[in-house]
Amino acid sequence: MQVNMLEAKNQLSRLVKAAQAGEEVIIANHGVPAVRLLPVENTRSAISLADELTGLRVLLSAENTELTTPPRVDRLNDFAATPRDEHAAD
């Protein structure tokens, strides 16, 4: 189905439902096709960041590899073993 902008503006809910049902919905500007409404893919099937990190940990443990993070030297680190005081007189 193709609709003009004004009709799309007035009937957006109906057009979204039609697109979610699998119908092709094209919005035209002065009769010229401009955009197509498509439903968003099911995000539940997408892998989560936590699952990605778990997979990375498994891969690293299988390779007996350890990731190390170098200490930050550009700012104070409250969690460092020996805190630095950049403002102290030497």
Image (cartoon, grey):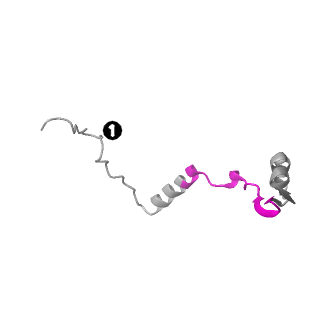
Quadrant where the N terminus sits is bottom right
Residue at the extreme left of the image, as rendered: 90
**Residue at image point 53% right, 53% down:** 54
**Residue drawn at point x = 81 percent, y = 53 percent:** 20
Q: Nearer the viewer, residue 61 or 81?
A: 81
Q: Secondary structure at mark 1?
A: loop
Q: Is residue 45 magenta?
A: yes
Q: Residues within 10 Å of mark 1 (few under 14, many from 20)?
A: few
Q: Is residue 88 magenta?
A: no
Q: Amino acid at mark 1?
A: Phe
Using residue 54 as the reference point, say whether residue 1 is left or right of it: right
Give the percent coordinates (x, y) of residue 76: 29, 40
Pick the residue in front: 5 or 43.
5
Provide residue 70's location: percent of width, then percent of height.
32, 52
Residue located farthest toward the front when viewing the structure as drawn: 30
Task: Name the residue tied to disc 1.
Answer: 79
Q: Position of residue 32 (x, y in %)?
A: 80, 64
Residue range highlighted in magenta = 28-52
Q: Going 14% across and 35% down the picture, which residue do you hit?
A: 89
In this picture, residue 51 sits left or right of residue 16: left
* Quarter residue 65 falls in: bottom left
* Residue under the image location 58 percent in, 52 percent down: 51
- Tag count: 1
**Residue 57 or residue 14, whichever sits in front:** 14
Image quarter (top left, top right, bottom left or bottom right) of the C terminus: top left
